[in-house]
Amino acid sequence: MTHVPSPCRVRNLPGRSLIVLPQEIDLSNSPALCAAITSFAGVRATRLSVLILDFTRTGFMDSQGARLVQDVRSRLPARVGVRVVAAPLGVPSRVLELTGVRRDVPVYDSLAEALES
């Protein structure tokens, strides 16, 4: 199985995978996170229809977090959907709004909403 850099957590569900991202995302860890996430998703590609990136525990994120979402999305097969979970008043939600990522990728306020869709 592909190793995802700590402190990420991975939870596999039927047809979906949930990746809980670390407390901080910036230039120091974003490239390694992107590589690990896309490698992980590639291994599960035949069984994966949705990849959920959970930013609810991320307290700091700069534009590298938004780039992470875009890069992961562009590297996955077109049939694999990417969903993002970000607390509505948190920094990640604001960064995703300011960078325009919310126009391209569905962003949910809670994990329950992302899992239900």
Image (cartoon, grey):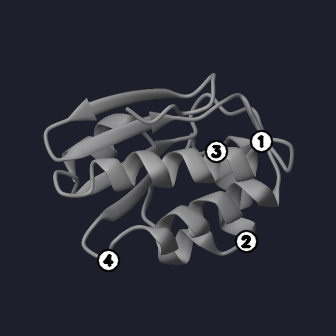
Per the image, the residue denoted by label 1 is: 29
CB under 8 Å between discs 2 and 3: no
Q: Looking at the image, is mark 2 or mark 3 nearer the viewer?
A: 3
Measure the alpha-carbon separation of dots 3 and 4.
20 Å
Q: Quadrant of residue 100?
A: bottom right
Residue 99 got which mark? 2
Tell me the amino acid under the disc marked 3. Answer: Leu
Q: Nearer the viewer, residue 102 or 79?
A: 79
Measure the alpha-carbon separation of dots 2 and 3.
19 Å
Measure the alpha-carbon separation of dots 4 and 2.
22 Å
Label count reads 4
Per the image, the residue denoted by label 3 is: 33
Name the N-terminal-most of marks 4 and 1. 1
Measure the alpha-carbon separation of dots 1 and 2.
19 Å
Tell me the amino acid under the disc marked 2. Answer: Thr
Measure the alpha-carbon separation of dots 4 and 1.
25 Å
Q: Residue at horizontal 26%, vertical 57%?
A: 45
CB under 8 Å between discs 3 and 4: no
